[in-house]
Amino acid sequence: MATLTYRDALNQALREEMQRDSNVFLMGEEVGVYQGAYKVSRGLLEEFGPKRIVDTPIAELGFAGIGVGAAMGGLRPVIEFMTWNFAVLALDQIVNSAAKMLYMSGGQIPMPIVFRGPNGAALQLSSQHSQAWESWVSHIPGLKVVAPATPADAKGLLKSAIRDNNPVIVLEGEMLYNQKGEVPDGEHIVPIGRADIKREGSDVTLVCHSKTLSVALKAADQLAEQDVSAEVLDLRSLRPLDEAAILSVRKTNRAVVVEEGWPHAGIGAQLVDLIQRDAFDDLDAPVQRVTQADVPMPYNKLLERAAKASPEKVVAAARRVLYLD
Amino acid sequence: MTATARRPKDTAQSDLQLRMLRQMLLIRRFEEKAAEAYALGKIGGFCHLYIGQEAVGVGALAALRDDDYVICSYREHGQALIKGISANAVMAELFGKATGCSKGKGGSMHLFDATRGFMGGHGIVGGHIPLGAGLAFASKYRGTDQVTVCFFGEAAVNIGAFHETLNMASVWKLPVIFLCENNRYGMGTAFERVAAVTDIVEHACSYDMAAELVDGMNVLTVYEATRRAVERARKQSHPTLLEVRTYRYMGHSMSDPLHGVYRTKDEVEEQKARDPIAHLAGKLKDEGVIDEAALDAMDSGVHAEVEEAVKFADESPDPEPGELFTDVLVD
């Protein structure tokens, strides 16, 4: 077990999977000579050469589609988007080509491809560079979607994604790349579709994923000071959802769902649907949601902070479901 | 005098041309039957016919090896048939039946046979152009000498994916042929009304790519041009843009008019006078390779094959209800 950054954990997963299978290659903007816009691919060009670490022009739609075609031709592409804000340009290929290929070919053409890159807001990048797209991609049948929050999960989920024979969306976090954590060496696989309890608790369940894990954990610390025991459930996979784990809200009878995205038709709405349908009689209060404010992200630091999900907002929501306020 | 007595010395050439004639006839008769079946409500949704453009698919595919890849837009019945999918399996797919080449889940726009390198039927204009380059990327990566031909219409040239893909295909020297079937109209819009550059072949200059302008009403011209492009792809791993000028006799799809607001009946009739099937049949008759009786026999054979396909499709079962939920993900 080594202590690695989230960035280096992803790098290790890529390196190990490329060593393991010569059909795996990485393609995207700045992945080679520049060593990655966020240095996730540092050293890979040197080890694997330009055939397998492919620098592209700024043409997300085009290289995403070339990746899909390469997967049709038997390869296992990993397509890096510099951010998911730019991946929106490639949605036609993700939605219309990758997600549907198996179905519309009557099961003939599997699509072992990974689309990955940072998702959500960093700091003061304003409206077009601060967006969380998970509800968009999770809407689509034929895709799997993962959003690791820790270095260990980042490594284990990326390895699973690369070995999966279906298209997998890997949502990383610009603010997570520097985060450190213990990562098992070598063969460390986190199965897609399994949530993880990151902190045990008995009074309220905080459901989160990706960057909102740290928000939820800070909120749990603050709640502990108020004698509230919060359980923190990290979804890790957004499609498929770990429904059994989510229904563990039965244990605390109260839930707060935290996400980076906008509230309307968000991931939280899907979770609330599941919880009200299958755990209605176990709930002691309506489920509360904490999301980004329903506005494009502002540039100003104070306004940006006000727009984002925060530990304070989660604490307030937890106190509401506990009827403490 | 019998036909065989006057056959030219190069029997391989005449055999190839006879085969191409039969293939064009098969597509023509197949599409006529598809139109009938559509009118009877046996085929639903969108159905884009290839009548008038047969020389393009037939000529181009004659230049390929069996293991080469072909990928198409939604006007792909013809290429699917020539790549070796049976008329039965294509017609059954149009009928939405379980015996169709995509198990009834794809329909007219999504014909597939991965075992024959027929990589679809794709429904978003221009969306499959990068997929074609991706198939070529895979062949080059794996060190095979397979070639990919990507068919698309002229309207796709205005889509960003076309330009992004041609650029990368040229930078990476991918063994792919971008075959633009210029039938003049994107649905009901004449190309010159919406394109600043109307000679599509000129776009290749922007991407430092070999290109050729081809008469798409002459199957032999298409064959020869594609052969040159295939050679360039297979031997040198260089891409080519072919602009093949052709004409569709029918409306954009079965739900669209043949003529009216966007083109005149006279124009359609004028183009039909250049019919690629009549042209090749006439040439082969002049050369004594085929006579009227042999041509009739060929047409009858094709008719029978298509009739059989309709019967097969009609009698085939619908997919099982449980098929709704299969093939979404691989287990």
Image (tube, coloured by chain):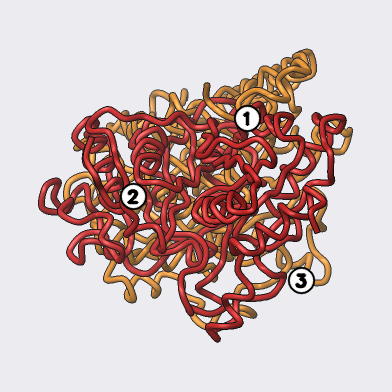
Chain colours: A red, B orange
Residue tagged 2: B224
Q: Which mark is residue A245?
A: 1
* Figure quadrant of residue B292: top right
Mark closer to the observer (3, 2): 3
Q: Are marks 2 and 1 in contact (CB under 8 Å)?
A: no
Q: Above or below — where is B325 with respect to A276? A: above
- The disc labelled 1 sits on which kind of residue? Ala
- The Cα–Cα distance between marks 2 and 1, rounded to whole angstroms, is 63 Å
Local packing at callout 3 (Cα closer than 10 Å; few below 14, some 14-19, many 20+) is: few
The residue located at (27%, 44%) in the rendering is: A25
Residue drawn where x is 87% and y is 30% of the image = A281
Which-is-in-front pick, marks 1 and 3?
1
Please give the label number shown on residue B262: 3
Q: What element carries label 3?
A: loop
Q: Nearer the viewer, residue B297 or A249?
A: A249
Image position of B276 (left or right of B15): right
